[in-house]
C-alpha cells in the first residue's frame, strides 16, 4: 500500500525534512582533513536532538550510528568510527534521516573534502544533476518509471554506473515505505503517481562499473572495482502539477 499524506502531515514531514536539511548545513562546516567520522556522527546526533528530532538510522535494523557516512568507494551505510579520518581529496556522503513528531525525512548529499580530482568532480556534478533531472518527471498522473528511466539515461550519457541493488523509497510514517524508487527503468512503467505521495529519490552513481559488494561489518556497501560513488537524495511530495522538495530550507 502506498500512503497518501494530507497537508497537515506533509507539513510535519517538511518540518522533519528541514531538520535534516539544517543538519546537513551544520555538518558541512566540519568536513575538513583530520576530522574523524565519529566526531561528525556525534555532532549529527546532538544537532538532530537539539531540534526535537531523533536520528532515524540509529537502531534501524540494528544500525549502530546516528547517520550514514560513506567515503570515496563506499556507496552507502558507512559506519562512523574514531579510527576513520577525512583526508584531502576525499568525497564524503552524509545520509541523514530524522524522525520528528512521528514523521521521517531522508536526504543524502556528497561533499568534497578540499580539492578533489577530475573523476570525483565529474561524478559528483552529474549525480546531483541526475537527481534533479529525475525529479522533473514527477507529478500526479505520471508513471514513476519515467523518473527512474530519466535518471538511468542521464547517468549513462555521462558515463556513470547506476547501482541497482539500492533504490529510493516511500517515506513518512516509516523510513522505508512503498513504493520502491529505482534509478533505472523504462518510461511508462511502474505505478501512477498521486498527489500526496511522499518519496525519497536517491541516485547512487559510480565512476567505474555499477557493481557493489558488502563489507565484513555487514553494513558498508562499496563499489566492487574501488572507483568512487556519489549519492544525492531528497524527500519530495507529489503535487498535481509537479513535486515539492521537503528536505530543503
Ligand atoms: N537513507 C538510508 C536509506 O534509505 C537510511 C539508512 S538507515 C540505516 O537506505 F540504518 F540503514 F542506515
Ligand atoms: Co533513503
Image (cartoon, helix red, strand yellow):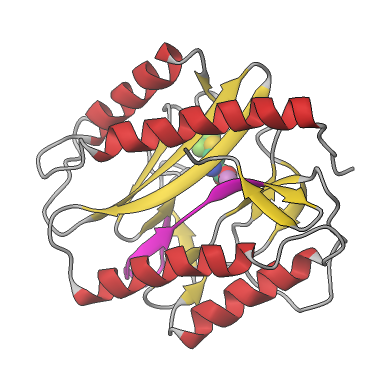
Q: Position of residue 215 (x, y in %)?
A: 41, 51
The answer to which quarter of the image holds residue 4 is top right
In the foreground, 129 or 113: 129
**Residue depicted at x 9% and y 39%:** 34
Looking at the image, in which quadrant does ligand 2 appear? top right
**Residue depicted at x 58% and y 26%:** 15
Give the left or right position of residue 161, taking residue 47 as reference. Answer: right
Q: Position of residue 104 (x, y in %)?
A: 63, 30
Seen as rendered, the residue at the extreme front is: 241
The answer to which quarter of the image holds residue 106 is top right
Q: Position of residue 37 (x, y in %)?
A: 25, 35
Give the left or right position of residue 104, taking residue 212 as reference. Answer: right
Note whether 78 is above or below 241 in the view shown.
above
**Residue depicted at x 62% and y 62%:** 135
Note whether 92 is above or below 185 in the view shown.
above
Does residue 209 appear anywhere in the picture?
yes
Q: Quadrant of the N terminus?
A: top right
Note whether 159 is above or below 14 in the view shown.
below
| Residue 233 among those drawn in magenta | yes
The magenta stretch spans which residues? 221-236
The answer to which quarter of the image holds residue 132 is bottom right
Give the left or right position of residue 117, taking residue 199 as reference. Answer: left
Does residue 57 appear anywhere in the picture?
no
Q: Position of residue 7 (x, y in %)?
A: 78, 31
| Residue 200 among those drawn in magenta | no
**Residue depicted at x 27% and y 70%:** 121
Amino acid at each position: 500500500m502506498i500512503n497518501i499524506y494530507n497537508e497537515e502531515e506533509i507539513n510535519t514531514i517538511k518540518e522533519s525534512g528541514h531538520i535534516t536539511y539544517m543538519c546537513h548545513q551544520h555538518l558541512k562546516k566540519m568536513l575538513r582533513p583530520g576530522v574523524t567520522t565519529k566526531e561528525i556522527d556525534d555532532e549529527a546526533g546532538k544537532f538532530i536532538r537539539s531540534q526535537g528530532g531523533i536520528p532515524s538510522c540509529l537502531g534501524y535494523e540494528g544500525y549502530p550510528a546516528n547517520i550514514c557516512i560513506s567515503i570515496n568507494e563506499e556507496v552507502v551505510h558507512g559506519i562512523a568510527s574514531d579510527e576513520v579520518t577525512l583526508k584531502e581529496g576525499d568525497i564524503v556522503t552524509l545520509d541523514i534521516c530524522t524522525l520528528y513528531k512521528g514523521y521521517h525525512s531522508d536526504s543524502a548529499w556528497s561533499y568534497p573534502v578540499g580539492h578533489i580530482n577530475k573523476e570525483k568532480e565529474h561524478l559528483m556534478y552529474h549525480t546531483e544533476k541526475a537527481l534533479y533531472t529525475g525529479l522533473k518527471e514527477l507529478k500526479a498522473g505520471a508513471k514513476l518509471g519515467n523518473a527512474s528511466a530519466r535518471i538511468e539515461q542521464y547517468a549513462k550519457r555521462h558515463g556513470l554506473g547506476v547501482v541497482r541493488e539500492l533504490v529510493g523509497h516511500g517515506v513518512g510514517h516509516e523510513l522505508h515505505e512503498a513504493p520502491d524508487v529505482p534509478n533505472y527503468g523504462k518510461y511508462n512503467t511502474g505505478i501512477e503517481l498521486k498527489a500526496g505521495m511522499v518519496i525519497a529519490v536517491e541516485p547512487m552513481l559510480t565512476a567505474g562499473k555499477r557493481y557493489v559488494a558488502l563489507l565484513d561489518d555487514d553494513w558498508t556497501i562499496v563499489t566492487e572495482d574501488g572507483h568512487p560513488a556519489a549519492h544525492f537524495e531528497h524527500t519530495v511530495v507529489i503535487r498535481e502539477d509537479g513535486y515539492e522538495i521537503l528536505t530543503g530550507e
